[in-house]
């Protein structure tokens, strides 16, 4: 129903987990440009946790091999270039959502003053997978569970805890220097995500 709308386009943008593009997914909700140049420790933390949260879903994906919605309903997806890969990749649970929710939890810990915006963006990120027609709702819910479990496990890692502390300092300095929440690109994202 949302095909060719701004929300559909945002869902397509959200599908790109390649760096450096993936780093900016939560920039607007954080109020800080997340980049290798401006927030190098946070950028590294997101790259590392992408691997942890993304891979955490694969054992279940391989076990269940649930067909994706577009295979069943024969409707379009927002990233048609990924269709052939997605056909053979199980739908349950959503790896993108596990990454997105893990990032939302990490970032809300780093910037508690932006927690509501960041967690809302994490929820919207999971919904993007439904809007793209590549995941069922239960896939997204399971992805959130896996993302939360991954973050809980990462807290036991001293390197991760050090990265969190360093990223918190970076973000605090960037928030004081430059808040991007009112930028044109953030206003466009906010409009696209409105219900």
Image: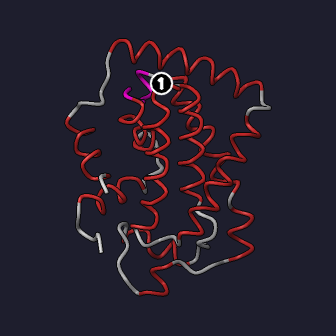
- x and y, in percent, of residue 110 in the image: 56, 25
Q: Image check: 70 left or right of 158?
A: left
Q: Residue at x 40, y 17 (%)?
A: 174
Q: Residue furthest left?
A: 184
Q: Quadrant of residue 121?
A: top left
In-front residue for pair 106/22: 106
In the image, which residues are magenta? Answer: 31-38
- x and y, in percent, of residue 144 in the image: 61, 54
Q: Is residue 131 above or below residue 156?
A: below
Which quadrant holds the N terminus? Answer: bottom left
- x and y, in percent, of residue 190 in the image: 28, 45
Q: Residue furthest right?
A: 156
What is the total number of numbered labels drawn onto the structure image? 1
What main secondary structure does the magenta stretch of the protein show? loop
Q: Image check: 97 left or right of 131?
A: right
In-front residue for pair 178/116: 116
The residue where tag 1 is placed is: 113
Q: Is residue 102 above or below residue 88?
A: above
**Magenta stretch encompasses residue 34:** yes
SS for dot 1 = helix
Q: Is residue 3 above or below residue 107?
A: below
- x and y, in percent, of residue 146 in the image: 68, 54
Q: Residue at x 40, y 53 (%)?
A: 14
In-front residue for pair 35/6: 6
Q: Residue at x 51, y 25 (%)?
A: 111
Which quadrant holds the C terminus? Answer: bottom left
């Amino acid at each position: 129903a949302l095909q060719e709308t701004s929300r559909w386009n945002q869902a397509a943008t959200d599908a790109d987990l390649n760096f450096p593009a993936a780093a900016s997914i939560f920039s607007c909700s954080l109020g800080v440009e997340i980049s290798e140049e401006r927030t190098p420790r946070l950028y590294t933390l997101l790259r590392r946790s992408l691997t942890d949260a993304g891979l955490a879903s694969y054992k279940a994906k391989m076990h269940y091999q649930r067909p994706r919605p577009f295979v069943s309903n024969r409707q379009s997806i927002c990233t048609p270039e990924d269709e052939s890969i997605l056909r053979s990749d199980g739908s349950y649970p959503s790896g993108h959502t596990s990454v997105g929710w893990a990032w939302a939890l990490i970032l809300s810990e780093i910037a508690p003053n932006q927690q509501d915006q960041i967690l809302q963006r994490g929820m919207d990120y999971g919904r993007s997978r439904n809007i793209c027609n590549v995941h069922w709702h239960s896939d997204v819910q399971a992805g959130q569970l896996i993302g939360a479990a991954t973050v809980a496990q990462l807290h036991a890692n001293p390197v991760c805890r050090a990265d969190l502390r360093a990223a918190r300092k970076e973000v605090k300095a960037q928030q004081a220097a430059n808040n991007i929440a009112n930028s044109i690109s953030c206003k466009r994202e906010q409009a696209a995500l409105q219900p």
